[in-house]
Image (cartoon, grey):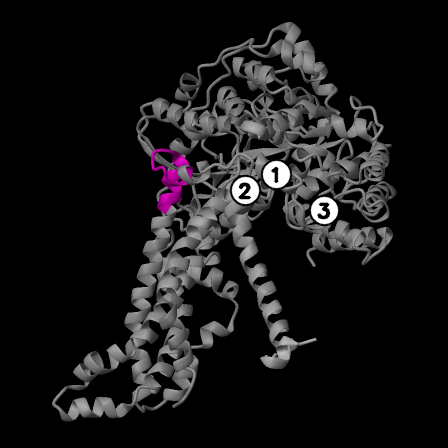
């Protein structure tokens, strides 16, 4: 009896138990993460009646895109309101992001490059706001916004989001600037560039991943924020999506398929943004975290 | 509203026969706990589904003209208003009636600008509280029945009586008016009065060996039926809800508590004073024990009852996984709406569900048959807390239209009963009764209605302390006795201002 393996010995690697355990764990984690989103998508394709069936329809017997067409049709009231909320969220989040970047970039650069009295205290002080739960500031900020005449305006949200978005943005960007060798700027200065030119033409391009990561962070934070928008806004024409989708709940009933369709639509911009720019996001987080 | 200018006399004078009936009515409506004797515009002593049918469609109203006598139709002004209107989950007819009202108001008062915000049921009270802190409140607000007194007691609302907008107090249920009376002064007008009823799935009853056409007559029967259904079919019998800080919980548990002879305070008594705590009396403990038996001993109610609101009961009921529950008329309408929108294979299932739905009176207990006398009231906000310039006449015009027989009927189309008793006589009431059968039962539950205590602390008692008591007993963190005593202590502390 000839054993093939005797002629052509195959080196069998022993099963790596830890590797497989890791794979199984990651698979379970993936299922745990993805399943709610898949279920959200499936429910959004059901009619109101089908969504309440038990046992649940794993795939709707009568799938419909009606919930999406209702949301995206500007000729009906539901569509008009959803699209308005969507536009409001986009406007508030974009404006918050732009302002956060405009303020955080020079602030982080200053913390990274300059030495001035109270620098360390000030640097930690920007985090003070983030050390308290948001709800503590709710009523004081509401009264302040009322005093400023900003209640029921998007300005109240942008200002508020900046108060808790900026500190982390500054910290994130400072770590990034710390990793850009100061010699590059010095070389530019020797070649005749002003400090501003060195910042704009040397440092800024190198810090693009960090700026993009900060922008994504600010955008997502503003896009998902609920409690301040819920408190500051009562006018439907001003509401943002997280508050607006509450309209799918009423006293005794919930429009689950409509709610799921709206939630899915709400997640699309964030997912797209993250997928397109994720390499910058990961790079910025890792590079900013390690000292070279 | 203190300004009495513009009040109008009622345009219909009662006959001698009506006077006799009205007097009788006043004497026999003790269950509504009237504190003021008014000659009602319908005969409350005859209250029954048959009587309601007999008066429906017997009178016509010209709302624009009636309100035009209070505030001239060419009045120029502005009014801001917050209320809970129709939302995405509500039946189509609710959206249509809501839109129709604003069209009618625009037609009746073309020169009054409206700034209207429809805010969801669970958000309105919180948003209103916040807006008052920042002097950013609307001129007019419609709140659930539990909410008004809290704000009146704190000075946030202005006095408002039916007479201020051209009606009389006799045009409204005495119990409903009492719910907006604080320290002897009225602070609102009822827009709609709602009572719930009992709904069950006849097929589940039959499958479990119960009579499919007979609901449980008593709350003890509910416990027995629920267990039998669980034992026979493995599904939930009764749709208990016990979520904290949710209005649904007291609306469904208090009827049981009152039926056994309990109460939070003495609100179920004929002449409540709210001075004595009843949450730890024998009746209250029996009701709590019944809930405990269903949840802990028999496990015959949804396990998720501790975090459920009524909205979470709808799915299992429609799916045939829940046999019976206390239901709002709007829920019945919603189920019909869902069934009508189902297509293909779903349609057959949906039709079968509707076919098996039955509705009847809420079970009675050893002491009484009871239901929460719910609904909403419309209020005017103290001008110092209002955003922008206050316009009393525009506010009155809106309130007159909203509380009219016509619109208090149409705006409560699927949900409840008109606040203005004249609404029961309108052609629209007749149409509602013909199309929403469940209304027969809920309107006939009205005389069994018990209002929540008319106290500023009522929201805290009903939405926090009562659900806490349920949670403590059902999670077995306390015995039934301990939970009831704990709730009594909390109510006493709250009432004493501790």
Which numbered disc covers residue A256? 2
In the rendered image, residue B118, in percent from the top left (x then y), is placed at 46, 39
A127 above or below A117? Answer: above
- Quadrant for residue A268, please give it: bottom left
Q: Are marks 2 and 1 on the same chain?
A: yes
Report the residue at 66% width, 47% height from top: B463
In the rendered image, residue B421, in percent from the top left (x then y), is placed at 59, 20
Q: Chain of mark 1?
A: A
* Residue marked by disc 1: A52
Q: Quadrant of the C terminus of chain B?
A: bottom right
Q: Chain of mark 3?
A: B
Q: Are marks 2 and 1 in contact (CB under 8 Å)?
A: yes
Q: Is residue A82 magenta?
A: yes
* Residue marked by disc 3: B305
Mark whose residue sits in front, 3 or 2 = 2
Residue at the outermost front position: A1
| In the foreground, B8 or B87 | B87
């Amino acid at each position: 009896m000839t054993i093939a393996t005797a002629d052509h010995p195959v080196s069998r690697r022993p099963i790596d138990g830890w590797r497989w355990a890791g794979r199984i764990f990651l698979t379970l984690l993936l299922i745990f993460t993805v399943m709610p989103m898949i279920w959200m998508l499936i429910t959004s394709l059901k009619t109101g009646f089908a969504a309440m069936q038990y046992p649940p329809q794993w795939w709707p017997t009568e799938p419909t895109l009606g919930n999406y067409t209702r949301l995206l049709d500007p000729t009906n009231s539901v569509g008009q309101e959803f699209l308005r909320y969507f536009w409001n969220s986009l406007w508030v989040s974009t404006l918050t992001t732009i302002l956060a970047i405009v303020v955080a970039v020079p602030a982080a650069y200053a913390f990274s490059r300059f030495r001035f009295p109270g620098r360390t205290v000030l640097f930690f002080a920007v985090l003070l706001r983030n050390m308290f739960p948001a709800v503590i500031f709710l009523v004081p900020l509401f009264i302040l916004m009322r005093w400023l005449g900003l209640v029921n305006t998007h300005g109240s949200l942008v200002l508020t989001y900046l108060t808790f978005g900026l500190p982390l943005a500054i910290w994130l960007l400072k770590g990034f600037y710390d990793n850009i060798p100061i010699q590059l700027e010095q070389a530019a200065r020797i070649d005749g560039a002003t400090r501003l030119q060195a910042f704009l033409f040397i440092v800024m391009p190198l810090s693009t991943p960090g700026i993009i990561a900060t922008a994504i962070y600010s955008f997502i934070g503003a896009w998902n924020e609920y409690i301040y928008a819920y408190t500051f806004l009562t006018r439907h024409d001003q509401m943002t999506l997280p508050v607006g989708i509450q309209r799918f709940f009423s006293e005794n009933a919930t429009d689950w398929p409509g709610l799921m369709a709206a939630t899915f639509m709400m997640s699309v911009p964030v997912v797209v943004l993250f997928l397109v720019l994720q390499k910058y996001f990961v790079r910025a987080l890792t590079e900013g975290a390690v000292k070279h | 509203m203190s300004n009495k200018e513009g009040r109008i006399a009622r345009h219909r004078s009662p006959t001698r026969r009506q006077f006799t009936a009205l007097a009788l009515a006043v004497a026999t409506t003790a269950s509504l706990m009237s504190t003021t004797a008014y000659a009602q515009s319908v005969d409350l002593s005859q209250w029954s589904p048959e009587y309601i049918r007999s008066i429906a469609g017997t009178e016509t109203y010209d709302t624009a003209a009636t309100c035009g006598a209070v505030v001239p139709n060419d009045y120029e002004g502005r009014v801001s208003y917050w209320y809970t209107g129709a939302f995405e989950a509500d039946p189509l007819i609710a959206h249509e009636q809501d839109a129709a009202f604003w069209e009618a108001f625009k037609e009746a008062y073309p020169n009054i600008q409206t700034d209207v915000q429809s805010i969801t049921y669970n958000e309105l009270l919180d948003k209103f509280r916040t807006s008052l802190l920042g002097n950013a409140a609307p001129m007019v607000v419609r709140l659930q029945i539990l909410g008004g007194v809290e704000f009146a007691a704190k000075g946030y609302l202005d006095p408002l009586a039916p007479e201020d907008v051209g009606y009389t107090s006799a045009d409204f249920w005495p119990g409903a008016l009492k719910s907006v009376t604080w320290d002897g002064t009225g602070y609102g007008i009822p827009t709609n009065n709602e009572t719930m009823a009992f709904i069950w799935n006849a097929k589940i009853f039959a499958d479990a060996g119960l009579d499919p056409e007979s609901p449980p007559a008593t709350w003890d029967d509910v416990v027995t039926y629920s267990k039998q259904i669980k034992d026979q079919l493995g599904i939930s019998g009764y749709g208990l809800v016990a979520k904290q800080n949710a209005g649904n919980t007291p609306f469904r548990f208090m009827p049981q508590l009152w039926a056994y002879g309990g109460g939070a305070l003495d609100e179920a008594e004929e002449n409540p004073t709210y001075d004595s705590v009843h949450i730890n009396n024998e009746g209250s403990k029996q009701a709590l024990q019944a809930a405990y038996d269903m949840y802990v001993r028999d496990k015959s109610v949804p396990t998720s009852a501790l975090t459920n609101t009524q909205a979470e009961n709808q799915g299992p009921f429609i799916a045939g996984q829940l046999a019976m529950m206390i239901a709002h008329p709007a829920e019945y309408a919603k189920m019909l709406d869902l069934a009508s929108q189902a297509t293909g294979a779903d349609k057959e299932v949906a039709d079968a569900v509707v076919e098996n739905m039955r509705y009847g009176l809420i079970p009675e207990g050893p002491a009484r048959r009871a239901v929460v006398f719910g609904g909403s009231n419309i209020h005017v906000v103290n001008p110092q807390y209002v955003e922008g310039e206050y316009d009393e006449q525009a506010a009155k015009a809106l309130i007159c239209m909203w509380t009219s027989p016509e619109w208090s009927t149409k705006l409560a189309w699927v949900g409840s009963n008109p606040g203005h008793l004249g609404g029961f006589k309108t052609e629209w009431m007749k149409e509602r009764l013909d199309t929403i059968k469940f209304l027969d039962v809920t309107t006939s539950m009205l005389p069994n209605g018990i209002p929540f205590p008319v106290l500023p602390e009522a929201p805290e008692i009903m939405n926090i302390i009562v659900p806490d008591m349920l949670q403590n007993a059902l999670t077995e963190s306390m015995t039934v006795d301990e939970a009831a005593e704990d709730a009594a202590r909390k109510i006493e502390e709250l009432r004493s201002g501790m």
